[in-house]
Amino acid sequence: MRPEALNPLFAEVETLDGVGPKLKKPLERLGLSRVRDVLFHLPDRFVTRRPVASLDEAGEGENIVIALTATEHRASRNQRAPYRVFAQDEIGNVLALTFFGRASFTAKKQLPVGEKRWVAGKLERYGDMLQMVHPDHVMEQADASLVHLNEPVYPLAEGLTQPRMASLAAQALDRAQALPEWIEPGVIAREKWLPWREALVAAHKAEAPAARDRLAYDELFANALALMLVRADNRARRGQSLQGDGSLRDRLQLPFPLTGAQRRSIDEITGDMAQESPMLRLLQGDVGAGKTVVALEAMLVAVEAGAQAAMLAPTEILARQHYDTLRRMAAPTGVEIALLTGRDKGKARESTLLGLLDGSIDIVIGTHAIFQDTVGYRNLGLVVIDEQHRFGVNQRLMLTKKGRRTPHTLAMTATPIPRTLTLAQYGEMDVSRLDEMPPGRQPIDTVVVAQERMDEVVNGVARHLSAGQQAYWVCPMVRDSETADIAAAEARYAMLEQRFGDQVVLVHGQLKPEIKDAAMERFASGEAKLLVATTVIEVGVDVPAATLMVIEQAERFGLAQLHQLRGRVGRGSEKSVCLLLRGEALSETGKARLALMRETQDGFRIAEEDLELRGGGELLGTRQSGDTPFRLATLEQIQRMLQMAHDDARLLMERDGGLTGERGEAARLLLYLQERDWGVQLLRGG
């Protein structure tokens, strides 16, 4: 149960004055559905305004407050042209107040001709005329709010204004009570931090780096504490010690010897599985580093020890692919492997369910269908989760409840995560890293080509296809809208289809699963030669004959994402090429990204450098590896304070009585406030 003191903050946003159905929509677009969300929606920056008596005192580009008298309203017949109100300052200088779209209706009311108004906004020049576009404020009297020299500028969505957002933030602050302190007193003293509520007020009212640090630290501390609780709870659970005799693993006939990194990871995993407390381990491996082999070895250990193993994949296509690969690899061992997806019906499904229940099926691979209530196991000993970030805590919890005792969990991800962020996102897990490539993998030639050479690129693709090879064509991220991405992909597909006919297939996130699967199947079987796709789908198919990857407007992608996409080729013995098509306007960051892609194929180095290039911006790219667990903490703050937060959480657990002492009670409030309450409830999972 959530502590009562926090209830006012978890009230719906409609309980704030002025929020009706109309305003609720833009607030929802910003992710602001409760009072708490508004409280943590901090300003992007602050505008400092200077009151001036005349325009002669102001500089272009400056934010000013000035008294003006409207002299003329001028509308254009062209609906798209701006609406202008001409006004004079007290000595006769003329300024154009410019409004676009619906704002013109407000302008007519707010600025009657011949009457004096106080106007605040940014002074700019348009041709030989001074103008102010969409003034921030127009008021009849120069009241205190207008001459506030420091005004917050909040991130907005269409339909929301700065004054309205500021009013909602003020109301949310009124509902926030002072809360007991959860941070270690020594840390508070050293950093000279304000108490929680005062820090919130300061962060909304002015540039206050120390206040923002404190709020970001709260988030990092709550996350560290929740992950520690999960880890402690996991260690206290009874699992089963699984020790294999090697009888099945000795029969494996792998095409090439294991790398040192694979052997090291297998040793770490088998060591964990031999313990009674359940394993919770993350296997990080670059695209093509051989995670599947490591997972198979772990699953065979479970089967040798008389238990079953389940492998969970995020999509049906990936589940089928894992099923085919693992069956082929495990053929000499004679273990029984089954596939279970949401599409299985009737007798086939019943026979799989029966096999899992009576133990005749050793390993099952599937989508989330494998942890539905109707699925029971004779003795589930190991759960392998592929692309770990796709599954929430609750889903993982359901799966770990399937065993008589808590099964061991091995999570895998092909997204190389910088060391800094591994602790933030997977702090409850032990980590194994596959940082070597198997022998025989050829490096991929990466070439950057200007978008205007499109005709040459299409001709190159034609030569490639006529030589019997296959290719991927990934369409650009158009803004951050999936529908626009799909439109871009459909347009490119139409163009390529004219040239290559039914050799081309299209795949994107909005297609029905059966249509998408059929297209993928045609490509995987070699019947189709060119796959056009958006990035929304994980192009997770393993097609060794695909040796060319074209990525349009590559500068729009995060490095980790480019690296993931490039890893879809280079899977066979043939030489592979990745063409990065770049647009005309290339930022310095864009240039640096594309240069790095040409220079290296080491995913871990790319992830670290990507972090440096992004600076304090988005954490891991919007679509790269699931959502970051943080709303307030910037990348710079994570790198600077994460270790400190972990040390503080450890102190609380080991010295200050955990969640039972005085500081522990306060920390319990924080876990609910930061929505890490699964930590309190000791749910298992990241």
Image (spheres, grey):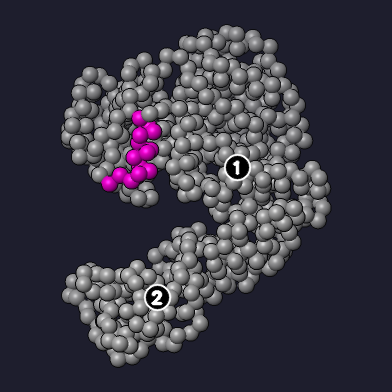
Residue 51: x percent and y percent? 42, 79
Residue 406: x percent and y percent? 71, 32
Q: Is residue 557 above or below residue 295?
A: below
Q: Amino acid at mark 1?
A: Ala
Residue nearest the viewer, comparing 146 with 247: 146
Q: Residue at x 35, y 44 (%)?
A: 588
Q: Which residue is mark 2?
A: 64
| Residue furthest to the bottom | 114
Residue 595 belongs to magenta span: yes
Q: Which residue is mark 1?
A: 424
Mark 1: few, some, or many residues within 10 Å (few <14, many ≥20)? Answer: many
Q: Is residue 40 above or below residue 552?
A: below
Residue 138: x percent and y percent? 39, 81
Residue 391 belongs to magenta span: no
First in sequence: mark 1 or mark 2? Answer: 2
Q: Residue at x 35, y 30 (%)?
A: 598
- Which image quarter is the C terminus in? top right
Residue nearest the viewer, comparing 235 with 634: 634
Does residue 598 appear in this view?
A: yes
Q: Tell me where residue 601 sits by quadrant.
A: top left
Left or right position of 445 against 500? right
Q: Residue at x 33, y 88 (%)?
A: 90
Q: Is residue 533 above or below residue 359?
A: below
- The CA span between labels 1 and 2 is 43 Å
SS at mark 2? strand
- The residue stretch that appears in magenta: 585-598
Q: Tell me where residue 614 sits by quadrant.
A: top left
Q: Amino acid at mark 2?
A: Ile
Q: Residue at x 53, y 71 (%)?
A: 168
